[in-house]
């Protein structure tokens, strides 16, 4: 005889706390956890980062008698089969559930890796990009090697980003973008990023940051297109407004989108975005941020430093794009903008007064410069060298060459002084260098400046007897510089390709051009060219600038 046992039920406020029968999802049933039946995902599924599935066919009739369970083996097999059909490959060991809000800078991105397109409603495809992005009518002969997003459903633009996703995206940006584009003051950003009263410009910057961050992640490609569309929409909105002085966040968003367009779209689109960015910088008059007359001394140093960094990043983009396309510079007024401070001073809000670019080039400053500031100095020297090349092309056949060789010698002396300073700073360094991508890029661009100067004097055929020594010295120095770049390429191969400076392919292509035009210099030329070519292929997986140099 079976014994009937009356089950007791706990009540709170007159209502039963027992979970409604049949309401638990498959994940909670499988883990034997209490399910709160929230939509679209219960709390347990949200924390585990898995899809919350409820099966209408899965129901268990609970017997009123504890000692009366019919067919236990059959029921267990049925339950296992149903769970296996829904999630045949789920492995709990793949997910890290130990997320701590206090250790923000040590978090991982496992939660975002489990976001699927099915988590969002279906969107109708956009017919075209925002109006400021030009339509591409010219066929591109370069294959797109980046991960394609066609056919992947994007989240709706008004879909809220929860706190966990928000923090993961911010951390991804700091890990993979901020060190290469150090224009953002982190404390200032975190002071407003969660504010419900943030401005449209701040929202635009936020989405621009996430656009670039997701583009450098293999797991988040399905999010980047919607972020990109939202950013472009906000940028178009600001462009249509008649505002006298745009906010600094708007300029920062423009800078990030230029980098995105160059790396993930194509050179023409990046060039067009750069034009908009430069106009914003000029409209804000950032080229005179440190002009003594009329400067607002009450403005805090961090805000001025952010504006300086926005100017110098736009200047760097303008310079590298002009080198790539052999065009004149658009931003030329650098006399009233101090060079960016060291990153540690900037991040810690430590006031310092940096020298001007002209002071550094004249050798009248002994200030310690950041790797980014050093790269600005060497990039400016390269630009002066290319301007001298244009001057040589315009010389008449009968003109004197004395003045030209004096300019070449002057630039060579400036380079020797800057390179000697770098050699002293890195005298204890060995290959491979540290994983600081900006420092590695700075050393590469410093060496490439010697290659640019060598090409300039080589194109000038009217060498006098007094200039033979300069020519021979430059040839030897160019060989050494090319070898240094080849050595650095070995170091870069050991870095994450997501952390390589976007314009590294420009330097590698210049080195490869030097080797190919001087194949009789040494016996290791072919090996060096092959190594650089392999590095370009390595970078081309995430950077379309490298794709253009591979053809």
Image (spheres, grey):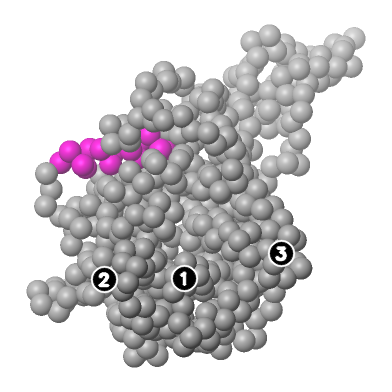
| Residue at screen point 34% across, 68% down | 397
398 or 52, which is in the foreground? 398
Near mark 2 (Cα within 10 A), the count class, few <14, some 14-19 or many ≥20, is some
Position of residue 78 measured from the top left corner of the image (x, y, whole percent): 81, 14
Q: Earlier in the sequence, mark 3 or mark 2?
A: 2
| Residue at screen point 17% across, 55% down | 283
Measure the C-alpha gap from mark 2 to mark 1.
33 Å
Say which mark, if any, is on residue 525.
3
Q: Earlier in the sequence, mark 1 or mark 3?
A: 1
Contact between labelled residues 2 and 3, with CB atoms less than 8 Å apart = no
| Residue at screen point 66% across, 66% down | 486
Is 249 left or right of 8, judged from the image as shown? left
Residue 234 sits inside the magenta stretch: yes
Q: Which residue is mark 1?
A: 461
Q: Which residues are magenta?
A: 227-241
| Residue at screen point 63% across, 59% down | 516
Measure the C-alpha gap from mark 1 to mark 3.
25 Å
Is 26 left or right of 410, judged from the image as shown? right
Q: Which residue is mark 2?
A: 334
């Amino acid at each position: 005889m079976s014994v009937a046992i009356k089950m007791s039920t706990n009540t709170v406020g007159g209502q039963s706390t027992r979970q409604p029968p049949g309401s638990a999802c498959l994940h909670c049933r499988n883990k034997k956890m209490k399910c709160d039946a929230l939509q679209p995902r219960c709390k347990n599924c949200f924390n585990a980062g898995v899809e919350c599935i409820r099966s209408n066919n899965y129901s268990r009739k609970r017997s009123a008698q504890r000692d009366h369970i019919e067919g236990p083996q059959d029921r267990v097999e049925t339950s296992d089969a149903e769970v296996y059909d829904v999630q045949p490959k789920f492995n709990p060991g793949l997910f890290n559930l130990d997320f701590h809000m206090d250790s923000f800078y040590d978090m991982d991105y496992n939660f975002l890796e489990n976001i699927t397109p099915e988590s969002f409603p279906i969107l109708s495809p956009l017919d075209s990009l925002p109006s400021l992005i030009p339509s591409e009518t010219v066929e591109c002969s370069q294959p797109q090697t980046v991960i394609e997003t066609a056919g992947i459903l994007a989240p709706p633009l008004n879909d809220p980003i929860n706190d966990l996703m928000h923090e993961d995206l911010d951390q991804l940006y700091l890990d993979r973008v901020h060190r290469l584009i150090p224009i953002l003051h982190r404390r200032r950003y975190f002071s407003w990023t969660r504010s419900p009263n943030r401005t449209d410009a701040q929202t635009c910057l936020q989405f621009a940051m996430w656009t670039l961050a997701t583009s450098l992640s293999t797991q988040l490609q399905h999010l980047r297109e919607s972020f990109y569309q939202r950013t472009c929409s906000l940028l178009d909105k600001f462009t249509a407004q008649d505002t006298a002085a745009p906010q600094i966040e708007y300029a920062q968003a423009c800078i990030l989108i230029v980098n995105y367009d160059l790396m993930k779209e194509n050179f023409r689109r990046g060039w067009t975005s750069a034009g908009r960015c430069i106009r914003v910088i000029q409209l804000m008059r950032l080229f005179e941020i440190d002009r003594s007359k009329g400067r607002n001394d009450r403005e805090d140093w961090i805000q001025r430093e952010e504006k300086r960094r926005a100017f110098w990043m736009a200047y760097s983009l303008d310079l590298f794009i002009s080198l790539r396309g052999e065009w004149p510079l658009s931003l030329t007024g650098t006399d009233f903008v101090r060079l960016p401070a060291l990153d540690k001073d900037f991040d810690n809000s430590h006031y310092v007064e940096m020298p001007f670019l002209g002071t550094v080039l004249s050798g009248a400053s002994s200030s310690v410069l950041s790797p980014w500031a050093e790269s600005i100095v060497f990039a400016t020297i390269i630009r002066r060298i290319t301007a001298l090349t244009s001057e040589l092309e315009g010389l008449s056949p009968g003109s004197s060459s004395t003045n030209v060789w004096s300019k070449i010698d002057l630039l060579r002396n400036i380079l020797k002084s800057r390179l000697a300073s770098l050699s002293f700073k890195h005298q204890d360094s060995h290959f491979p260098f540290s994983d600081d991508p900006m420092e590695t890029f700075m050393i590469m661009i410093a060496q490439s400046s010697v290659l640019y100067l060598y090409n300039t004097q080589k194109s000038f055929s009217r060498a006098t007897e007094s200039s033979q020594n300069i020519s021979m010295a430059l040839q030897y120095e160019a060989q050494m510089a090319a070898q240094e770049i080849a050595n650095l390429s070995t170091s870069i191969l050991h870095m994450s390709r997501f952390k390589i400076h976007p314009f590294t392919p420009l330097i590698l292509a210049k080195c490869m051009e030097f080797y190919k035009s001087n194949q009789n210099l040494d016996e290791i030329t072919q090996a060096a060219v092959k190594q650089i070519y392999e590095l370009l292929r390595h970078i081309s997986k995430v950077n379309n600038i490298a794709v253009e140099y591979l053809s």
